[in-house]
Image (cartoon, helix red, strand yellow):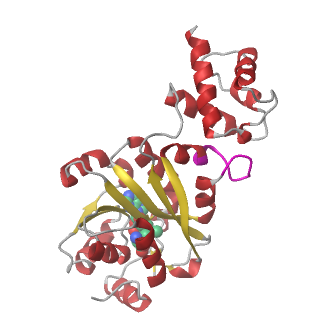
Amino acid sequence: MAYLANPKNTIEILQKYHFNFQKKFGQNFLIDFHVLDKIMDAAEIGADDFVLEIGPGIGTMTQYLCERARKVVSVEIDANLIPILQDTLREYPNAEILHHDILKLDVSALVREKNDGKPVKVVANLPYYITTPIVMGLLESRAPIDSMTVMVQKEVAERMRAKPGGKDYGALSLAVQYYAKPQIAANVPPNCFMPRPNVGSAVICLKRHEKPPVMTEDEKLMFRLIRASFQQRRKTLANGLSHANIRGLSKEQIQEAILLLGVPENIRGEKLTLAQFAELSNIINRMCGE
Ligand code: SAM
């Protein structure tokens, strides 16, 4: 098999099909065997696994996945890549290509139809312009996904795994960590891609929690509080929340809730842990129920 991880083979295929990279689709194709090995190790792909791949490109990682997994379904938005994939993956009967926009795909229905609703693994070198909607969309959909091992912008990987207090900590850290345990598996420099991206990249593995690590009575309220707290990072938590019109509560009521949480009145949202956001949502929920 002509592995596309070899840059010579990638160039040959691109020329054969007169392929033009589309910036708007975030196309940076992998050309490095070591990085692919690291992704396979981090994702722990085994012979029984069903893999959902997002954005296969010309099929570089798909070839690797197909050699290890039972079944690989790859979702690609760019119509120009479909005939190329049919060529580069022709030796893999366990490969299936779907021409679709991942953001418009009902992943739960796909897993029901193609894997009897049993958990799948997501593996992807993501298009960076829509990393957050893809990752959050999949986590929030509650589709049966065991883990997501994804290449993202390095800075985004740092934000996903950040702990309270630091500059990287924010709504994305809290949202990801509510659903999953993030772990960075590799840092990847621009020269591992064609064309080279302007930013560094990292492979991050998100292992889904069996049950959420914190208890909230109202998940939606907790995420509203989180978003409102980080909308203006420099504001105190009390100010941030009172401007967000949380269930019509006055500034005094918000301050009361913060005091009940047992933290200083002038604390900033970036100091609160996920457990504290959950607790604050429960306090506010009860205040409103009285
Ligand atoms: N997996 C390939 C690799 O590693 O060489 C390509 C990765 S490239 C960074 C991202 C891929 O996602 C491209 O093939 C791009 O066309 C595709 N893509 C972009 N937006 C998409 C979307 N909304 N749905 C599905 N695929 C998308």
> Which quarter of the rendering shows the C terminus?
top right
Percent from the top left, x then y, of residue 29? 45, 76
Magenta span contains residue 266? no
Frontmost residue, 270 versus 14: 270
As drawn, is 183 to the left or to the right of 262?
A: left
Can residue 123 be seen in this snapshot? yes
- Left or right of residue 42: residue 262: right
Main SS of the magenta segment? loop
Q: Is residue 278 above or below residue 28?
A: above
* Left or right: where 17 falls relative to 283: left
Q: Is residue 106 visible?
A: no
Judging depth in this view, the residue of 261 and 120 nearest the camera is 261
Image quadrant of residue 142?
A: top left
Task: Please tell me which residue is depicted at 27% across the width and 80% down the height of the picture.
Answer: 88
Image location of residue 58, percent across then percent down: 35, 75
Look at the image and give the residue range highlighted in magenta.
163-173
In the rendered image, residue 57, in percent from the top left (x then y), is placed at 37, 71
Question: Which image quadrant for residue 200?
Answer: bottom right
Residue 128 position in % (x across, y down): 52, 62
Q: Residue at x 63, y 61 (%)?
A: 155
Which quarter of the rendered image does ligand 1 occupy?
bottom left
